Image (spheres, rainbow, N blue to C red):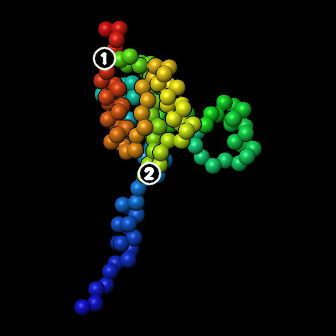
Amino acid sequence: MLVYRNRNAEEKRVKQIQPLTESQLQIQIFEWAQLMTGKYPELSLLYHIPNEGKRSVYYGAKLKREGLKSGVPDICLPIPKGNYCGLYIELKVGKNKPTKNQEHWLFSLSKAGHRTAVCYTREQVQKEILSYLALKDTSE
């Protein structure tokens, strides 16, 4: 028996199961955060720190002069909760791991009173953010 396969359908299926890029994952996270601001108004302060990306040597040098720092985590929620003064999340996809410089930033931020996390999926980020928002203020 000869079986004919729909190549376009197979290509679409393969594309669907490919892991998301970090950029695609960030877009999903911020779309979710925008949808959740009605319930959690603090999420309107959530922002992305654009430290990654390919740049020309000139533009990269200019950004460094303007204060760009390698290793700074990707996402920040700058509100105090519990014993923390803010939340920083380093986002990774696939088998990527934090660099030594990223680990240094996460450690230093944690030591300075921030909650830090490394997350690999949208669900992990959402759980981390919601867990953070659920913390009781220590001043109460």
Q: Residue at x 36, y 60 (%)?
A: 17
- In the rendered structure, which amino acid carries the disc numbered 2? Lys
How far apart in space, not on screen, are marks 1 and 2 (Cα)?
A: 34 Å
Q: Is residue 77 left or right of residue 5?
A: right
- Mark drawn on residue 136: 1
Q: Residues within 10 Å of mark 2 (few under 14, many from 20)?
A: few
- In the rendered image, residue 13, in percent from the top left (x then y), is placed at 35, 66
Q: Is residue 8 above or below residue 3?
A: above
Residue that badge 2 annotates: 95
Residue at the (64%, 34%) spot, across then down: 68
Q: Closer to the observer: label 1 or label 2? A: 2
Q: Report the front residue among 53 and 90.
A: 90
At horizontal 58% and vertical 43% (from top left) the residue drawn is 52
Image location of residue 62, percent across then percent down:
73, 37
Residue with the most extreme top position: 139
Element under disc 2? loop
- Specify which label sits upstream in the sequence, 1 or 2: 2
Left or right of 40 on screen, residue 1: left
State the residue lying farthest toward the left: 1
